[in-house]
Amino acid sequence: MRYGCHCAHLTIKRLLGVPPWAEQIQRLLVSLLPGFNLPGVVRVSFGIQNTEAEVDALIGVLGTIARKPRTQGLGRRMDDFVGAATRRVYAHL
């Protein structure tokens, strides 16, 4: 599991609605407080060493997260992004 922007900082910050002025403050905070948590997303990957119990635990946690109310506007931005990305992929097939 990894948290952050996954080499897609502009996309993630746009999806999360981080304004340009906040990005400048974030850079300052990170330089002063390296352990400061910034907005981002979580990426999960499985490997051959993972057990069925670990997969079940992840599914349970994802279900809990999915039932939480979305941040105002985030769902719409995510839907817009997924739609645009899907159209671009299919345009190149």
Image: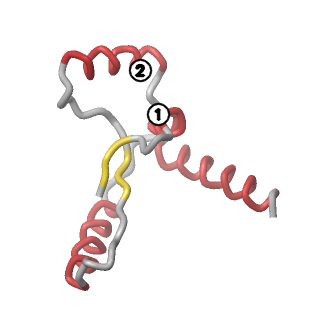
- Measured in 3D between alpha carbons, the distance from the residue under mark 1 to the one under mark 2, in whole angstroms, is 8 Å
Q: Quadrant of the C terminus?
A: bottom right
Indicate the quadrant containing the N terminus: top left, top right, bottom left or bottom right.
Answer: bottom left
Mark 2 is on which residue type?
Glu
The answer to which of 64 and 93 lies nearer the viewer is 93
Q: Which quadrant would residue 18 be assigned to in this image?
A: top left
Q: Residue at x 48, y 18 (%)?
A: 20
Q: Nearer the viewer, residue 62 or 41?
A: 41
Q: Is residue 2 left or right of residue 73?
A: left
Tell me the residue at 69%/50% (across/down).
84
Looking at marks 1 and 2 on the same chain, the residue that comes earlier in the sequence is marked by: 1
> Where does label 1 land, which residue?
13
User: Quick check: marks 1 and 2 in contact, CB under 8 Å?
Assistant: yes
Q: Quadrant of residue 83?
A: bottom right
Quarter-of-image position of residue 47: bottom left
| Residue 34 against residue 31 in the figure, above or below | below
In this view, the residue farthest toward the bottom is: 52
Q: Label 1 is placed on what type of residue?
A: Lys
Regarding mark 2 in the picture, which secondary structure is present there?
A: helix
The x and y percentages for residue 69 are 34, 53
Expressed as whole percent of the image width and height from the top left, the position of residue 16 reads 44, 37
Name the residue carrying label 2.
23
Regarding mark 1 in the picture, which secondary structure is present there? helix
The residue drawn where x is 74% and y is 53% is: 88
Whether residue 10 sits left or right of residue 41 in the image: it is right
Locate residue 89, reporting x and y percent: 72, 58
